[in-house]
Amino acid sequence: MKRRLPFILFIATAAFLAWGLSGCLISGVFTIDYAFHDDIHSSSSPTLDAWGRGYVDLTENATYNDHKDKLKGIESLCIVMDVENHLDQNVSGEIWIAYDSYDSKSEVMQHGTRIFRGIALGPNEERHLGCGDIQDILENLDAFEDAVKVGRFWVYGFGNEDEYDVTFSHIVLIMAFAAGL
Amino acid sequence: MKLPFRSVLLAISVITVPAAFAGSYPLGVELFGGFDMPLVQEDVGSGPMYGISVRGHVISIFHAQLVFRGSSQGDKDESITPIGAPSLTETLQGGSLTGFGLNVLLAGKKPALVWPYGFIGISTNSFAPGQRDKETLLGTSWGGGLAVSLYRNIVYADANASLLVMPIENNSASRKNLQIGVGLMYMFQIPMK
């Protein structure tokens, strides 16, 4: 047994190397940032100008296009934006995503997925939100990951209260995703 | 993936049991420091690394080495340009990467004045990015090093480099880190009989 041990260790080493080098070695984690073309102005009494939604087309991003066919998963997500509460009362904002364009909040809530809520704003408050502010209130990242793999989706912004009037502006998505090379 | 206690026990046994047959046996205890450099990872940066290892001879050219290491994953600044607003820099926090593993070293049987070695290893790693949930990742390592005796083959200066590969996303991708360390190793003579 003692004489065979080096041979056994050699075979085990070769098998280990083969396993370790297979599949996952030629890959990486990449970041992209995507700036929204328009602000999302959302009001409880929506008008043509204040129905809060924005369209995301990640295929506009070169890095995404380079890797979209070998995208394996989202490692992290961050949303940077400015938020402004136009009312003289507290409001709590939330963001939803959906694949189609809808004309009412109830339709979005029926067909879409909320990816975060809990942006608390005081009366007439305007705030800049960075990665650290958003990270803890993100949810349903699996659904977001699926949307990123598709590459095109709608983003909706709402307030939680019965009456709200909020603008989400200068929005930038920052994503780190795993992909093959 | 958690490394169960039995595996740790087995690893220790791999080092100590063969030594029991050897009569007298040196265990190399090393403190090391260095740098950890993520490869093809745009969300984390390089950072310092530190650790401790214990190595012992098993059979022929095979040695076993238990390693604990910790490293900081550096922050990454992402420059973004919101439409209609000035550019700004958002910092993606790096976090930490700690690992505990078992390496198989291929080296000369006895400590020598110049003692080169190669190794492969397996480890359990705790990856704690600054703004995300902590992940436990199984890792494999490949690398090599050179130990040079500073005093009577008892005290060694050691330099090594290794590639740590940690599969993610159901083994379809990986995080890879190049880890370079230098350390000081002391060979403890353990009388076993």
Image (spheres, rainbow, N blue to C red):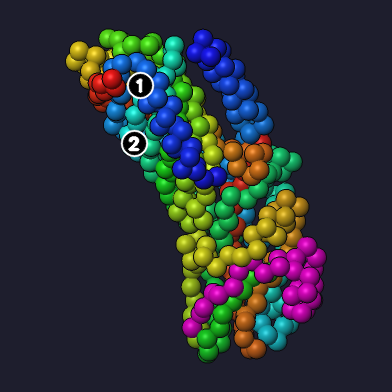
Considering every residue shown, the one lying at the far front of the view is B193
Q: Which mark is residue A179?
A: none
Give the mark toward the camera: 2 or 1: 1
Left or right, B26 with reference to B98: left
In the rendered image, residue A74, in percent from the top left (x then y), is placed at 63, 50
Q: Nearer the viewer, residue B124 or B166?
A: B124
Left or right, A74 with reference to B147: right
Q: Nearer the viewer, residue B131 or B158?
A: B158
- The correct choice, above or below, for B173 with respect to A12 in the image is below
The quadrant holding residue B83 is bottom right
In the rendered image, residue B136, in percent from the top left (x then y), is placed at 52, 47
Residue position for label 2 = B51
Q: Nearer the viewer, residue A41 or B1?
A: B1
Q: Is residue B162 visible?
A: no
For marks 2 and 1 on the same chain, the one whose residue lies earlier in the sequence: 1
In the image, the segment drawn in magenta is: A97-122
In the rendered image, residue B35, in percent from the top left (x then y), is placed at 37, 34
Residue located at (52% from left, 62% from top):
A135
Q: Is residue A176 visible?
A: yes
* Residue type at the position of mark 1: Ala
Residue located at (61% from left, 47% from top):
A177
Residue located at (44% from left, 11% from top):
B60
The quadrant holding residue A115 is bottom right
* Residue type at the position of mark 2: Gly
Q: Secondary structure at mark 1?
A: helix
Residue position for label 1 = B20
